[in-house]
Image (cartoon, rainbow, N blue to C red):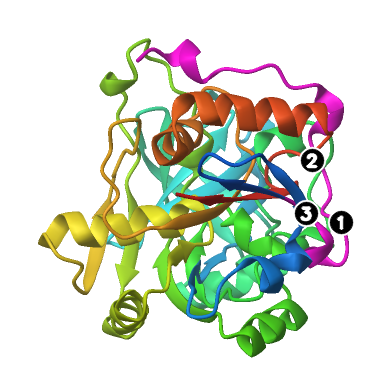
Amino acid sequence: MILDDFDYNLPNYLIADRPISPRSSSRLLVVKKLESFCDSKVSNLPDILNINDLLVFNDTKVLQSRLFGFRVRESSKAIINVTLLSENEDNSWLALIKPLRKIKVGEIIKFNDFFSATLIGKRDGQGVLNFNLTKSSLRSALLEFGSMPLPPYIESQRKADERDKVDYQSIFARNDGAVAAPTASLHFDSELIARLREKGVQSAFVTLHVGAGTFLPVKVTDIKDHKMHSEWGEVTETTLAKIRETKARGGRIIPVGTTALRIIETAFLKGGIITPWSGMTDIFIYPGFKFSVSDGLITNFHLPKSTLMMLVSAFIGSQRTRDLYSHAIKNKYRFFSYGDACLLLR
């Protein structure tokens, strides 16, 4: 399998830079094995899903991790853009810094009179920062001064604003740590969840702190040579009990988003059976992968040549995926993080 197998041409006007409102009014393309594609809406999920199905959501919370500051020297001042990527064990942060070449190790980036960070190292084109605030104070400062780390294809069109602080966060968000949203969850609102519950569709939660690596391009021709970024995740005993109960009742396990799917499949692979698990995962799912837990998947439409396109191809087949995307483009579905969704049933 080569990278070009996962390419497609997308008109720019189909890239959504804002979500529609209400969230559940997004379009939903339903894909069942050997059946024609069905054009629907997310709000119709209670009529589409079965009693005893289990939706698995990622409850990670996106940090307002984008900061704008200055590197100050006696002779000059430079504007520095910082996007926090992940926290290290010593409470320093790995960060994407632009332009990294304009700041030296040991220099300070000032965000305001009391909030600053020192560059203590450079690693693989990224910076390592020590902040002058405690862990809890830093979280408060990010809420006040940080902005949402929108994907590059949105940031190239507009800057993040106050609306994104709500729009780019799921209603389930409760565990700080992500620098990108689990975007399939953005289609769900409290009214839809209530209707699903009335139908008998259950919910469970996992955590996977989505990293900026989700937007990194695949640069190798043979996809098997690609190295995935690592992300922290957790599957609890409470969620595992719901998965077991659902399987026993003949219900289906349907992760909401590729991140939820990746973490529950990781939990199975680490233990041979699905067991409580937490830690770093770099699971790479591409055609040929054997799914052990997931019976369906709700996901958005993904970037061409991305690892997420490879995951979808693994889930429903490469030709089915190509047909799915051709149908979505022809019928003018909205693409990427703020776009529409599809329901894939194996």
Report the residue marked by disc 2: 334
Who is closer to the viewer here, 25 or 223? 25
Where does residue 286 sit, x and y in percent of width and height? 35, 32
Asked if the magenta segment contains residue 26, the reply would be yes
Report the residue marked by disc 1: 20
Q: Name the amino acid, label 1.
A: Ile
The span from disc 2 to disc 1 (Cα, nearest Å) is 10 Å
Note whether 145 is above or below 315 in the view shown: below
Q: Looking at the figure, which quarter contains the N terminus? A: top left
Where does residue 307 sit, x and y in percent of width and height? 44, 32
Asked if the magenta segment contains residue 266, the reply would be no
Q: Residue at x 44, y 22 (%)?
A: 218
Note whether 25 is above or below 82 in the view shown: below
Would residue 71 be seen by someone viewing this image from the given angle?
Answer: no
Report the residue marked by disc 3: 40
Of circles 3 and 2, which is in front? 3
| Within-10-Å neighbours for mark 2: few <14, some 14–19, many 20+ | many
Q: Which mark is residue 206?
A: none
Lower position in the chain sequence, tag 3 or tag 2: 3
The span from disc 3 to disc 2 (Cα, nearest Å) is 13 Å
Q: Contact (CB < 8 A) between labels 3 and 2?
A: no
Q: Name the amino acid, label 3.
A: Ser
Who is closer to the viewer here, 256 or 327? 327
Would residue 74 be seen by someone viewing this image from the given angle?
Answer: yes
The span from disc 1 to disc 3 (Cα, nearest Å) is 15 Å
Who is closer to the viewer here, 248 or 100? 248
Does dot 3 land on a helix, a strand or a loop?
A: strand
Residue furthest out toward the front: 35
Q: Contact (CB < 8 A) between labels 2 and 1?
A: yes
Lower position in the chain sequence, tag 1 or tag 3: 1
Of circles 1 and 3, which is in front? 3
Q: Which residues are magenta?
A: 1-28
